[in-house]
């Protein structure tokens, strides 16, 4: 109630935005569109700082880039510092989000890194023959049916895919170098897709220290600092169970993404 009374001085507050889950454009996943309102409100609340609570195994590189860019734009416009606090994991796209912060802190058991790009799928050659089905595909453009899972793998298709992955990897690496700069241990190749745990992530420059959100923010802004949470709203239909199946499928995919890191 105090903050609504114009003649009383408000206690400083830190705005918390939680970034938990895989990064994608569908369902309950983290996306720029889904998080836009929460992020905008967090910075407009006139905080002393914005704290990102991160637990994400990664996902879409484009959505990771868009979310991080929104955070940086608002941080620069509002002149508000941003701190990232990694919980279980900030890997791949999850680490991309963490690097949007000015400082990154981890738990001793947090996993960070996985600075690489991955593409995975299935080869279903011969599957349709076994069930007596015939697949008919017509294209204009020789690369339009690249990596068709029902056709034998073509070396030219794999080469093109590798080129795309390498291009995305360079974008990722440039983002990390721009944001972390001289903090990185330049004696090691940190861009192999490898991961580090807790203090080891700090040692190689992927994080700034070991620390948890509340005590770190109180130490930085005083014991009177308060905390306000901002989060993405559930889609309207999801509140009535209309997306149960979609959420279940995405939950399986997200579980698989976390499992890559033993979580």
Image (cartoon, rainbow, N blue to C red):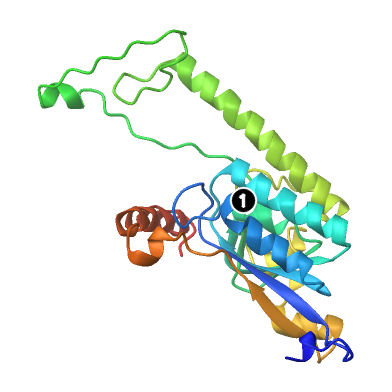
Residue 171: horizontal and vertical position, in percent?
Answer: 70, 36
The one nearer the camera, 52 or 37, is: 37
Residue drawn 61% across and 50% down? 32
Q: Which residue is mark 1?
A: 32
Is 70 located above or below residue 217 in the figure?
A: above
Residue drawn 37% across and 20% down? 153
- Left or right of residue 140: residue 60: right
User: In which quadrant of the rendered image does the N terminus lie?
Assistant: bottom right
- Left or right of residue 131: residue 234: right
**Residue 37 visible in rendering:** yes
Residue drawn 56% across and 59% down? 56
Q: Secondary structure at mark 1?
A: helix
Residue 26: horizontal and vertical position, in percent?
Answer: 46, 48
Q: Quadrant of residue 98?
A: bottom right
Q: Quadrant of residue 13?
A: bottom right
**Residue 208 visible in rendering:** no
Residue drawn 52% across and 19% down? 159
- Left or right of residue 33: residue 149: left
Residue 74: horizontal and vertical position, in percent?
Answer: 80, 57
- Left or right of residue 74: residue 139: left
Badge 1 density bin: few <14, some 14–19, many ≥20, Cα 10 Å:
many
The one nearer the camera, 229 or 186, is: 229
Residue 118: horizontal and vertical position, in percent?
Answer: 52, 39
């Amino acid at each position: 109630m105090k903050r609504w009374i114009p003649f009383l001085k408000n206690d400083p507050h830190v705005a918390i935005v939680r970034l938990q889950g895989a990064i994608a454009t569908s369902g309950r996943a983290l996306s720029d569109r889904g998080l836009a309102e929460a992020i905008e409100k967090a910075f407009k609340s006139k905080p002393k700082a914005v704290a990102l609570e991160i637990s994400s195994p990664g996902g879409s590189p484009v959505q990771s880039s868009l979310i991080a860019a929104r955070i940086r734009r608002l941080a620069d416009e509002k002149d508000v510092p941003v701190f990232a606090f990694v919980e279980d994991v900030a890997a791949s796209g999850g680490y991309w989000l963490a690097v949007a912060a000015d400082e990154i802190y981890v738990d001793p058991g947090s996993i960070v890194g996985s600075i690489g790009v991955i593409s995975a799928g299935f080869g279903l050659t011969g599957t349709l023959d076994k069930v007596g089905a015939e697949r008919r595909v017509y294209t204009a453009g020789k690369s339009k049916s690249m990596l068709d899972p029902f056709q034998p793998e073509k070396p030219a298709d794999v080469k093109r895919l590798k080129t795309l992955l390498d291009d995305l990897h360079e974008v990722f690496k440039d983002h990390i170098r721009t944001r972390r700069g001289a903090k990185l241990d330049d004696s090691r190749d940190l861009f192999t897709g490898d991961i580090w745990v807790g203090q080891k992530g700090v040692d190689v420059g992927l994080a700034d220290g070991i620390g948890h959100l509340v005590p770190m923010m109180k130490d930085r802004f005083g014991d009177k600092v308060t905390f306000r949470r901002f989060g993405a709203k559930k889609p309207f239909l999801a509140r009535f169970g209309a997306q149960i199946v979609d959420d279940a499928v995405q939950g399986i995919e997200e579980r698989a993404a976390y499992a890559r890191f033993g979580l």
